Image (tube, rainbow, N blue to C red):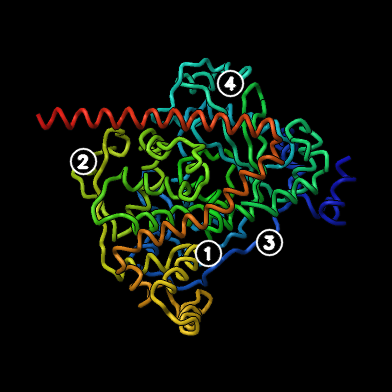
Amino acid sequence: MTVRIIPTVLGKRSLRELYCCPQTLSTRDRCCTRLTPRRPVRSFATETAQNSKTTKDGSSAYQNGAPSADNTASALSPADWEENPDLSISRFTDLPSKNFGVNQHMIINEEFKEALRQILWQFRAPIRYAFAYGSGVFSQSGSGGSSPVQSVHPSPSEAIEKVQTSGPKMIDFIFGVSYTQHWHSLNLGEHRKHYSALGSLGSYSVSKIQDSFGAGVYFNPYITVNGTLIKYGVVNIDTLCRDLSGWNTLYLAGRLQKPVKILRDHPAVRVANQINLLSAVRTALLLLPPDFTEQDLYAQIAGISYLGDPRMSLPAENPRKVINIVAGQITNFRRLYKPLIDQLPNLTFNDPRTSGREWDLDESVNAKLAQDMDPVRRGNMVRRLPKSFREKLYFEYQAKFGIPRGEFSQMLEESAEEDTERFGRREGGRFEQRIAKDETGLKKEIEDVIRKTVRWPSTVESFKGLLTAGISRSWRYAKEKREKAKAGERDKKADQIKTDTEKRQTSK
């Protein structure tokens, strides 16, 4: 059956050409690998390679892109990975350095991690990249409950029961795949019940709906695998890398700006996500004052993908979502972003507590930070925002500054990334510095661009769920989200009453 399906999906290439099947693999590995397509040659590079050198916002100083095992920066890469990101790589040995991007890997309970990996093994269709995320994996402040685990998961493993003792949650996954239609073809044959009525139309229709609308993700919610209730989304790795490196929709990039548990890694995605994380820090810095705290920074980053999300305005999401995420995962955010903070010379920890050993493991510490507000350095940060996102910001300021279209087009052409003769580095020019000097309006303009980037794909994905998940499961999902929103509102009011009471007592 598999041999007859593949040519209709991928063309008349032989199985030998299409699939790698090492003869020395174990039985378990052969089961996973024999149907794994070779990755197509891919290039999403948006900048040209240049000689590496330290710049004012420090991005090139962070050549390595990740901390080493002892939380210090590794040796610099001879190539400037951020200026010319090679997203066609398929081997981890092709990464800029040995420890590149290890900050993306969160540390969780080993038994729980193995339980999550066992869920992946129930899918015979090849998954090239996978991560678990959300409150079902990482605890969040205010997300506890008294319900037994079995009220959500029919027969969960002991590891999942131990992790979710404070409140059972459905576990969310994202699967990155090489060939969307091929993957759904195999998965429909194995797990037809995972799909709504749309699955009856076949893998072509399923993949067409996935890739043509919204952010390019296909979700199957409320699926029981290994006795555990899960939701999984399927995305093409090309689509994932484009969003991570260019912020086309911020739909998946936003999820990976928060701590996730990567279960299957891919070198190209690791490079693209490191660009995504660095872009998130720069964006947050442009929105923050000269002095702030770690929680301020992480909340700004975590809130990026929620700006413009229709669920936040309906309301169909907990209004305290961002606060709960950061408060319950401060050490995970620190692991994710501290290596980037350490490598940016315009951003420093300004807190004596950070001089202590292993302070970064102390959940009670909310360290103070300070950034350099020099317009040249901030202009450089504007220039190094993701391409798609940056262009939208430029057009906003073209209108605000009243720059004629001809002059604006010429300016963009002169600063084009592809023009290697004029740009040795992505340095901000007069236009970017003028943007950076707009102290009163920059925050509003950036937030408006974020909303415009997020709103449409998020709205389409919500409506697409009616087709992909079906009416009943979509209604169940919306109902649960609404209940969470109400609970969040109650918590918000309770906190406000507590704050007002404390103020009155202090005034007395």
Query: Does the residue at mark 2 contact the one at mark 1 (Cβ under 8 Å)?
Result: no
Left or right, 197 with reference to 113: right
- Give the residue furthest to the left: 508
Left or right, 12 with reference to 211: right
The N terminus appears in which quarter of the rendering? top right
- CA neighbours of label 2 inside 10 A, class few (<14), some (14 to 19), many (20+): some
**Where does label 3 land, which residue?**
41
**Where does label 4 land, which residue?**
152
As drawn, the label of residue 388 is 1
- SS of the residue under disc 3: loop
Residue 380 or residue 453, whichever sits in front: 453
Residue 169 appears in view: yes
Residue 22 appears in view: no
Pointer 1 or 4: first along the chain: 4
**Where does label 2 land, which residue?**
353
Pointer 2 or 4: first along the chain: 4
Pointer 2 or 3: first along the chain: 3
Residue type at tag 3: Val
Q: In the displayed structure, would residue 359 be above or below residue 390? A: above
The C terminus appears in which quarter of the rendering? top left
2 vs 1, front mark:
1
Residue type at tag 1: Ser
Disc 2/disc 4 C-alpha distance (Å):
41 Å
Residue 324 screen position, x and y as percent: 39, 34
Pointer 4 or 3: first along the chain: 3
Query: Does the residue at mark 1 contact the one at mark 4 (Cβ under 8 Å)?
Result: no
Residue 138 screen position, x and y as percent: 46, 32
Disc 3/disc 1 C-alpha distance (Å):
22 Å
